[in-house]
Amino acid sequence: MAMFTQAHDFNVHGGNFINNTYYGTSHAQDILNKLNPSKASFKFGHHSPCLEGTRIGILGMLMDWARNPDSQPIFWLSGIAGTGKSTIAQSFCESLEKNHLLGGSFFCSRESEECRDVGRIVPTLAYFLAQQFKPYFEQIKVALEADTTLASQSIKRQLESLLLHPLQNIKRSQSYSYFVLVIDALDECEDVDATQNVISILNSMPLAFYSHIHIFVSCRPEYYIQQEFERTSNKALFKLHDMQSEIIQKDIQLYLHGSLHDQHLSANDIVLLSEQAGKLFIYAFTQVQYLKKAPGPVALKSRLNDLLRNKFIVNSIDSLYNLLLAKAIVGMQANEKEEAKYFINFIVSLSDPLSQHALSELWKPCDVD
């Protein structure tokens, strides 16, 4: 029953679809399971939402776009690393769900094999959209019964068979809503060519394809992505890194104040920290984590002084990380420093990132016979 709690335009009674030939949800679930969805939905908590009161302007603009069925069908939120794209996408998904507009979401991540596989995006979005939209479920049921391997087909075949054809077969009427599909951090997918292909195919879709869906994509302005997006006029574009500094500074100050209210920092301290962060929310986030983990008031004051007296190049996250690493090894013995250095070198040299759990497992001492 949980899988259809957000659905529209049909009634569920005692686990059965009314006026549907399939009674009970087990058959429906069996059909959708053929899509092999990834655990990449916003509900899996990969990211925290924006702190209340921050990013109001951009979130309001996104909801205005989402509520207007005649707006550009694709919204591209572009931003350099650390500008808060995923946090915005998380909050956007929560707002869409509250307004019954979320069709599905996929949060890409380099840290997870299933979340960096571009081939999992379309089947996962189809899985969640089918739970929200009965007419679409009826169409995708036919497609999956005809070919149970669609989830493992090429990106082009997936888009055509799981989205384009089912959506085109649905007659548009006032009783049928439209939904927003959210793809966050598309640049974190490992297959560059396939990722570029996704955008290329979406750009080439007929406008009728977007009668029932709009698509939101957030990612860094990587050349191969930017090149494809610039080829279409059917998009709205917003560049986070081009926002006025004053607006971002206000949001960062609100974030710092809300996150560090228990530490009782002065208003001037908050302003100085925000100025160091510049336009990078990841910088402010790292500042917060460093200060909140101080073991006591004396250590907090010391850490705050460390941050404020070091005249970093504004927006230089590397400089901040250098300070934190330098402070982390204070008091270590020579052999401990060497081990820490070896461990950091090991992480940096990885061709693909590993999770914290995987790293800890690799670093466990082992018995040697």
Image (spheres, rainbow, N blue to C red):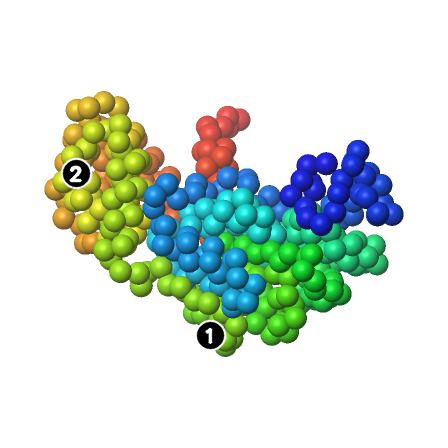
Horizontal and vertical percent for residue 252? 28, 46
> Secondary structure under badge 1?
loop
For image coordinates 29% across by 29% down, the residue present is 293
The residue beneath circle 2 is 267
Q: Earlier in the sequence, mark 1 or mark 2?
A: 1
- Is residue 111 visible from the viewing direction of this image? no
Name above or below for residue 297 compared with residue 125.
above
Q: Residue furthest left?
A: 309
Image quadrant where one finds the N terminus: top right
For image coordinates 50% across by 39% down, the residue present is 45
User: 310 or 132: nearer the eye?
Assistant: 132
Horizontal and vertical percent for residue 3? 69, 40
For image coordinates 14% across by 48% down, the residue present is 311
Label of residue 230 in the image: 1
Name above or below for residue 367 compared with residue 103.
above
In the rendered structure, the answer to whether residue 141 lies left or right of residue 299 reads right
In the rendered structure, the answer to whether residue 245 lies left or right of residue 126 reads left
Please state which of the two labelled residues, at mark 1 or mark 2, is closer to the viewer: 2
In the rendered structure, the answer to whether residue 2 lies left or right of residue 228 reads right
Horizontal and vertical percent for residue 279? 28, 54
Q: Residue furthest top?
A: 296
Q: Amino acid at mark 1?
A: Glu
Q: Are marks 1 and 2 in contact (CB under 8 Å)?
A: no
User: 244 or 295: nearer the eye?
Assistant: 244
In space, the residues marked 1 and 2 are separated at their CA atoms by: 43 Å
Horizontal and vertical percent for residue 264? 20, 29
For image coordinates 41% across by 52% down, the residue present is 59
User: 285 or 172: nearer the eye?
Assistant: 172
Q: Amino acid at mark 2?
A: Ala
